[in-house]
Image (cartoon, coloured by chain):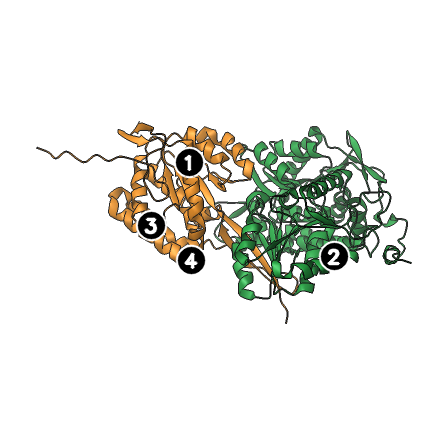
Amino acid sequence: MTELDKKQIGVPVPADWAYARLQERYGHFVGGDWLEPAETYTTISPATEEPLAEVGQATPEEVDRAVAAARAAFENGWSGLAASERAKYLFRIARILQERAREFAVLESLNGGKPIKESRDVDLPLAAAHFFYYAGWADKLEYAFPNRRPHPIGVAGQIIPWNFPLLMLAWKIAPALAAGNTVVLKPAETTPLTALLFADVLRQAELPAGVVNLLTGDGRTGAALVEHPGVDKIAFTGSTEVGKAIQRQLAGSGKRLTLELGGKAANIVFDDAALDQAVEGIVNGIYFNQGHVCCAGSRLFVQESIYEPLVEKLRRRLETLRVGDPLDKNTDVGAINSAQQLAKIRELVASGEEEGAQIYQPPCRLPEKGYWFVPTVFTEVAQSYRIAQEEIFGPVLSVLTFRTPEEALEKANNTPYGLSAGVWTEKGSRILWMAQRLRAGVVWANTFNRFDPTSPFGGYKESGFGREGGLHGLEPYLRFDE
Amino acid sequence: MTRLPVKKTYKLFVGGEFPRSESGRTYEAEGQNVARASRKDVRDAVKAARAAQPKWAGATAYNRGQVLYRLAEMVEARAGEFAELSTGREEVERAIDRGSSNPVAGPYFNFTVPEPTGVVAVLAPEEPPLLGLVSRLIPPVVGGNSVVAVASETRPLAAIELAEAVATSDVPGGVINILTGYRRELGPVLASHMDVNALDLAGADGDSPELERLAAENVKRVVHGRADVQSPWEIASFLELKTVWHPIGQ
């Protein structure tokens, strides 16, 4: 048996994913009830291409009904409810998510393709923690914003991406509700199922009807929500391209806007770094969630003197990554979220090869059905290559080199994005020097891809504006009488 | 016989200097010929602002506070109408500090610090010409940004007076740049400029929607400032928040 065969024979995976308790068909969750959709589409498993369910493609009329339901809920009680009562609903939601974590984790991996160990150990615990954290602030807004007399804004329209479906839902809904707003949320086209299951959490929590409304659909539904005059605030997480389009669409409307957009994070390794830890951080930084992460460490900058040993370690580590069934607990890298995304990754990887970069992919046997991409490392990459400039949003790392800290900074900041960055060095003063100068909203030093509800997250420059997480994450959902 | 006064030429203020518009154009306002800035002047001003910004941002808040206090002194010395400026607004930096240390659930030290956004473009309100400009100009500067401001179109003289106070203060050249001219002409150039990070549309009037659309091209932070608001929170619109993580271990 070859090493490759040994690697591929994992623990057998239970064939049925009955635990996810799928329905054949879902409507829109509007005003506390299921609205039979006028149009539908099929959502699939990206790992097998099997159809999972029929879901609604919300029309402008359905968007209108959802916004009306949210408005009614805002006017008729939610905004006037004692803040401590709002908090209790949020605590309930957090608790129910914890209780039903397994069900959500299975469904998340099934519909999105991410490894179950990630949905189980990252997405679900963090989603529950976000509700828990913001529940705590709901009745302490006066304390959080002293002398500013905070008030809710009204109806928030929220549009979220497919890379962390339930977690992004939590990032959006928890602060909005804690601040006293009501919500119309649209999950991503390819990953609607955990949001739809979340409606059942709201039922169990007995959240008043209309406080949270969930519409599924593609970009047309999103555009209708952004345009709707009854929406007071838009929060969007997704690509920079769509973010710009939304900002344009909202020009002159007076609606509040926050954007969490793309990134092309630099992960910078100095010659004095703890190399084995750095390699783990690099791997986590770019292959976590198949690289479908806006803050992924997709540009690796290595100090020249350690370039060869580091790249060698990285290659060896790559050979141990297991790519395959998202529902297998041993899987490190799951399925690419959609055929469309796979095509985009392939296109950019081909451009890297054409422009002259050296490609390395570990030996890997991929399943026949489904959307897959082998974890990839490019060396000999120049700053000008597309793979060093554009967000790939896949398991593809570009390795570049530098000699001095100044050069590392110059190269790292040479991008229109500014979401995150990583620094690896044992020298404390250098960490702080780099952290001060990196133009990015999150800097991970000697670690990468850490998230916490208390920790503000968001970008500089074309990576968007506004912060999610922490006290700062409440501000976009409040207005102040100053 | 009364003495004939020396007549003043009202020019632009870019990079710490007082150039005429490169276009050679002027327009008449308040009985004076005032420079009518061109799109090239806007680009030059943004370039000067970008060049000056890192050093200004790198100065300590204490130092920036003292420099702005000195500016207030200069303004105070210049004219009675400037007196209202010297309200000690330089003290606000620490009040706005929205940084925090964040109690994450894990062995990490995690903190958030405010940082300047970069280059801020300001369309100053038409009225009041001086206080409106100062109200919109100073908050981003306090936060460590550099600014390119378009003065009141109909009453630009006070802005040039202010520029002279800035020039004789210790504010480094390029941190504050003031243009006079037609806002219809200059607004779109600033709103679409790819090296401008934030846009204050205080004086944009009916042009706001179009300017906001242009601003989306590089995801500018757009602020609708008011001439009469003087709150430390005004600074926050021109700050970014950076969060830094580090593991705790032996």
| Pointers 4 and 2 in contact (C-beta within 8 Å) | no
Q: Earlier in the sequence, mark 4 or mark 1?
A: 1
Q: Colour of chain B?
A: orange
Q: Which residue is mark 4?
A: B60
Q: Amino acid at mark 3?
A: Thr
| Comparing labels 4 and 2, the label whose residue is closer to the camera | 2
Q: Which residue is mark 1?
A: B42
| Residue A440 visible, this angle | no
Q: Which residue is mark 3?
A: B87
Q: Which mark is residue A315?
A: 2
Q: What SS does tag 4 mark?
A: loop
Q: What SS does tag 1 mark?
A: helix
* Residue at the outermost front position: A356
**How far, Cα to Cα, is label 4 from label 3?**
21 Å
Q: Position of residue A12 (x, y in %)?
A: 90, 55
Q: Position of residue B197 (x, y in %)?
A: 50, 42
Viewport quadrant of the N terminus of chain A: bottom right
**How far, Cα to Cα, is label 1 from label 2?**
50 Å
The answer to whether tags 4 and 2 share a subunit is no
